Amino acid sequence: MPLRQPAARAAGANGVGRLVTPLPPGLTTVPSLGRWIRLTDDGRVVALTGKVEIGQGLLTALRTVVAEELDVEPGRVEVVSAHTGRTPDEGTTAGSMSIETSGANLRQASAWARRLLLERASNRLGVPVARLDVADGEIRAPGVNERLDYWQLIDAAFLDFEIPEHTPEKPPAEYRWVGHAGQRRVDVEAKATAAAFVHDAPAELHARLVRPPSVNHRLAELDIRVASPGTLVVDGSFVAVAHPSESEAVRWAERVADKARWRLALRSPRAEIDEQRRAAAAAFPIRDGRPVRGPRREIPTTFRATYSRPFLMHASLGPSAASALWHADGLASAPRLVIESASQGIESLRGVIARATGLDVDGIEVRHVAGAGCYGHNGADDAAFDAALVARAVPGRKVLLKWSREDEHGFEPLGPPMHIEMGAKLDARGRVAAWTHDVYGFTHVSRPSPRAAGVDLLSARLLGEPLEPSPSRPALAPEVGIHRNALPIYAFPAQEVTKHFIAGAPVRTSALRGLGAQGNVFAIESFMDELAHEADVSPDEFRRRHLGQDARAVAVLDAALAASGGLAGNRGLGLARYKNRQCCAAVVAEVAVDDSTAAIRVAKLWIAADAGRVIDPDGLRNQLEGGAIQALSWCLKEAVTFDSEGAVANRDWESYPILRFSEVPTVETVLVDHPELDPVGAGEATVGPTSAALANAVFAATGLRVRDLPMTPERLRQVAAG
């Protein structure tokens, strides 16, 4: 097959002095074009992605990328998401990386598909590629009556083509859909009108769990029989009920729970990051962006402050759920175990379930089906394993297992607490001359992985032959876990940033939206505000003085200030670039604090953000604003508490309140578009800046500096009392 560069896409690209653009990593790993792009007999384009839709609008954005590059109407494009053995393995949907990675993979694959199809059309019509025009997949040439379309030109060789190198992509000046408003979300209609969620999957049996009081309890006694057609599943301390009727499954689970007796097998250590824990923590100074083992530099400082956040829940509105079918013996041609799950990492989940069940990986099929939105590691993977365990006990019958609200709140992996100590010294000009940042915490990284030492699925440790979880270890890659966004966006003459890892968390902790970025940016931006007041400089000007040559950060800062009209009154500011390389966001918050109740009400937020090339403006705004609202909920209301035996005490919405619709502020968002640049992740960019903007606005309104989250009325009164 010819590999000529199409002249329509290669103006000036004669190879002389031309920089070689590398292929996206996904295409290097999976170079077969047919694994990414397929054209169907009914005139559609199917794009395949290993990433998943968790409410962030990803499938809509990917559809737009493919439609743009192929010059077809977006309505022709169907995006197929995360199905083991069918879609490319693109890892876990996490870290605001999906547009960067899968978007780049599909854009380049689509460019190759267009290139190959136009070369075929050129050969057939006898017209140079440069003279061909495409409209919705129809190929035309001036002076030629014959018209072709993409679907007339495909064959097996097209699907089997292996992408050898980068090919030119459509220049932004020619975009028709990318960057334009009004794109129709592809997932909303099904979610609003049909059974789009895994919770609604058809099944022969419904299952409910009977959980112990905590992960540290084990089953001591259970004397009950479940009447047919129900089934009681007991494996060690894993207890579940399956029944053809969902309501009967719930009732029988309640009866079994009444009969179950549990013993406390292991008492949890204290939950607080207290002085004793901090003294025992392992210190990892950041060198060239990475935590390393070695001594921490001592930098003298004169201004110091300490900030903290508590344990947090994902608190998805819908509890975790999954379906599983364990095929009976004799069906060698089919996968032994088929799972539908809202997991954000189906490939890893498959490998871990294979290890836990003793099945071969190829004997397990996992398909992503939407669940309640979650940015981070909630109970979706655990529910998939729970469903598999029940399905193994009733082979040949599809099981739909749902967690209860109490299960979700009590057993999901929690976002870990953080303790941050800041230090600084100002010079005679009121600039930061020295800066220190010490962040302490438990791990933020415990997603199940086949490469991990243990089996990191909740019920694995409850089995009669338990499978132990992996020991927690410090993540030492750049911008991972505790130290994410601990490095400031600002340029200081001397700084020392240190990650302090605490082993032995009292409960499971793992990724929650932003990981360490929320706590670190809350501390950095609050401290910058404090230093600005100490230097008697406006908070925005103080930041501007320390941004050095970061013109894009300055532009975002200026855009937020222009939108809000400045920081006068009860307003605060927060600024950060997520992971110090992705979306840069500035947030201005305006608050009102009730003098009698000490309740904080956020009246309005202004957001400005630079995420490189904007794919879907509406989707990007939704991501930025959703992150900001979630941050307000964390900062104003949310905190996990524990009982005397170490079990999570907040098992409902009354004991774990989240922000209500009536408390959501007006939000105005400005997008700083750079169509000439690649897009970068934005889903977690506003959680840190919003947290700090809120704290700084509360200070502007009351003169009270709240350094410990959440900012409840009780907390505000404590600060006021000194």
Image: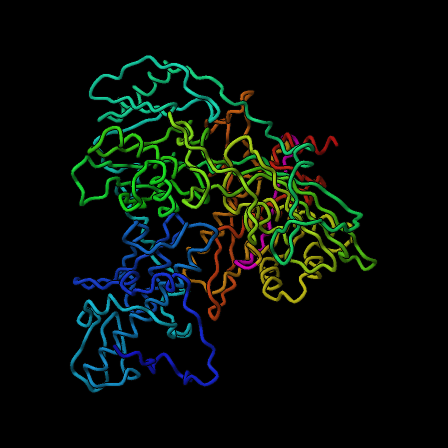
Q: How many marks?
A: 0
Q: Is residue 129 visible?
A: yes
Location of the N terminus by quadrant is bottom left
Q: Is residue 105 magenta?
A: no
Image position of 324 with respect to 256: above or below = below
| Residue 589 inside the magenta-drawn segment | yes
Could you say where residue 645 lies in the image, as x and y percent from the top left?
54, 21
Q: Give the range drawn in magenta.
A: 581-597
Q: Which residue lies furthest to the right in this view?
A: 428
Q: Nearer the viewer, residue 393 or 316?
A: 393
Whether residue 606 is visible here, answered yes or no, is no
Horizontal relation, residue 710 to residue 617: left or right: right
Residue under the image location 37 percent in, 74 percent down: 167
Residue under the point 57% across and 48% down: 517
**Residue in the image at 31% along x and 36% along y:** 199
Which quadrant of the structure image shows residue 638? top right
Q: Is residue 115 above or below residue 235?
A: below
Q: Where is residue 545 in the image (x, y as percent from the top left)?
A: 71, 61
Report whether 262 appears left or right of 239. Answer: right
Of residue 582 and residue 654, the one placed in the foreground of this image is 582
Left or right: residue 139 versus residue 97 is: left
Q: Where in the figure is residue 209, as x and y percent of width and height?
A: 35, 26
Locate residue 383, reporting x and y percent.
Answer: 36, 35
